[in-house]
Structure formats: structure tokens, C-alpha cells
Image (cartoon, coloured by chain):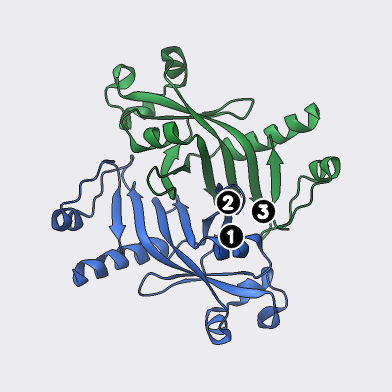
Chain colours: A blue, B green
Amino acid sequence: MKQEQNQNIEKLIEMVKDVRVCMLITKEQSTEDFSGRPMTISKIDDDGTLWFFTRISSLKVDEIEESKNVSIAIINERSNNYLMISGSASLENDKVKIKELWSPFLKAWFPLGLDDPDMTLIKVTPSEVNYWDSSSSKMVVLFNMLKAIVTGKEYTEGEHGKIDL
Amino acid sequence: MKQEQNQNIEKLIEMVKDVRVCMLITKEQSTEDFSGRPMTISKIDDDGTLWFFTRISSLKVDEIEESKNVSIAIINERSNNYLMISGSASLENDKVKIKELWSPFLKAWFPLGLDDPDMTLIKVTPSEVNYWDSSSSKMVVLFNMLKAIVTGKEYTEGEHGKIDL
């Protein structure tokens, strides 16, 4: 269902493209509990891949090296978009890629700029996206109906849509 | 350190009181991965306890019965507040409590009102609160300095404050 998958990714990109800050959630190494911190989304690719800048020395990098399963929570009251993205995280240290995604506003976190040796990208490949739409005054039922029909999958929670990528 | 604890709770309440929608994150029963959904905070008590209305039949109720450790992600761009609250969740079916927290806007989710038999409260007792303050143009370092001094606890991630309740 290539066409359907493209529609799903387009929907994801549409919901994410204006989002500045999300919560990136990893698993704590010791407790297996959740660990989250606000992160700026640097870019979402045409295939739905999400990119973040971070410090190599940060705790989240250790946590991702330990467990690549991460979640991204998005609460965008401005556009009434609420998303939970599950995916696989990896570190990307390629200097060409870092330079491609670099933006002057990142100097707030990396005053040394591209010369900072403690800089890496986190790449998140989404595997599942749950979203809620509340453009009406309440949360509305918004399935990806095509997906539901094609797969015959039942949605046990009635209030949201689920995109499998 | 009773006084300090009170200050921490006051800080938490101040940051949460204007928040409408948060992401309530539970553990998926089968996979131990994260499961999240947007939830309206019905109330935060003077001691920091958070209250949510939900359906008894919802998946999150099963997940809480399985594992009481939950997290609450708050992204409030309006007030530049970013929080991750870890805590212990329990179900509260007391009709008096439900009536006390009931608000007419909940009819959007519970058209039957207080007579709906599929209604319960989720009570979350926070155990740890991480927050970030970005009232300046960038994320700023905001420790709970008193706590750091009192406990001698080291903060390995420099960009945020941590409230232990």
C-alpha cells in the first residue's frame, strides 16, 4: 500500500512541520522508567525521519545507546495537534549531515558552532504514530479510515488515529 | 526540609495550573514500551496530586492496573513551561470525589454526565518533577539551587531543574 503509506507520511509531516519543541522520551538505564526532555526538532525529512541536535556527553545519548526505542510527545495547542511518535533512535556524527542541518539559532546551545566537538545528531525513524485531532471544540474521532478498512484492524480506543509507517 | 518541599510543590502548582492538555504516558502491557495520550488535567491539589477523568474501559486503565509508574509530559509554549512529572497512578472511583471534580466541560467526553457508569478518576502522586524554563529566548539553566545545596546532589544535565517531592 505504497500510496497509503505516502499519505500517512504526508499527514505526519503536515502535523510536525510547525512544531518547535517536543518531548523526547527515552528509557532510563537503571530503572527502565521514562526519561524525557524538551527538544527542538531540527528537521523532518520527506520520509518522516526526525532530526535533533544534542551533546554527545548528555545522558540521553547514553540512554539511546542502551535502548534505541524512543518516543516523541508533541503537544501543539496552537494548531491543536497531539501526537505520540514511537521510533528507533540512532546517533549520526557525519559532519556533512551536521552541516546540512545546522542553523544559526542552534548557537544558543552550541556557542562554538560547528566546531564544537561535543555535538551529534539524533536520528529518529518513526515506526508508529498516534495522533489526536481537536480542531473542533472537543477531541474528535479521527481514524485513518483507509488503513482501518485495508488492514481490518480494530481500534480499541475510539478517540484517535494511528499511523503505521 | 518541610519548607523547601512546600516551595517545590508551590512551584509545581504554579507551572501546572494553567495547563489544559498534557500527555499521560503509561507502559504498554505487552511490549513495556511507552504509550501516551493527551489528557486534560482536571485538578492539581495543594499537595501536588493530579486528577484526570477517564473511562474505566480505556486501555490506559488496564495499563495503570498493570504498572502504576506513569509520566506526565507538559509542553506549554504559551508560558514557556516544559515539565516531565514522574509519579504513581491509581484509580479513584469514589462518587463523592468524582462529583467534587466534575465540570460541565467534561460532557464532551461523558455525555451521560455523572450517571455514566464507565467513569473513573486517575490520581497521580508525583514523585519527581523535571522542569525547564525558557522565559528567556533560549533554554536557561534553572536549578532548584536550595535543593542542590541541601542534598549535595549533583545535576549531570546542566539545563534543567529537578524537584523531588
Which residue matches tag 3? B135
Q: Position of residue A162 (x, y in %)?
A: 30, 53
Q: Residues within 10 Å of mark 3 (few under 14, many from 20)?
A: few
From where the camera sits, is residue A79 visible? no
Q: CA–CA distance between discs 2 and 3?
A: 23 Å
Question: Would you identify the image quadrant in which residue B125 lies?
Answer: top right
Frontmost of labels 2 and 3 is 2
Q: CA–CA distance between discs 1 and 2?
A: 9 Å
Q: Which mark is residue A35?
A: 2
Frontmost of labels 3 and 1 is 1
Query: With respect to residue A60, does B73 lie above or below?
Result: above
Q: Residue furthest top?
A: B96
Q: Quadrant of the C terminus of chain A?
A: bottom left
Q: At 58% across and 51% down in the image, what residue appears?
A: A35
Q: Position of residue A55 (x, y in %)?
A: 65, 69
Q: Amino acid at mark 2?
A: Ser
Mark 1 touches mark 2? (CB < 8 Å): yes
Name the element at disc 3: loop
Q: Quadrant of the N terminus of chain A?
A: bottom left
Which residue matches tag 1? A63
Q: Amino acid at mark 3?
A: Ser
Q: Position of residue B143 (x, y in %)?
A: 75, 49
Q: At 33% across and 39% down in the image, what residue appears?
A: A138
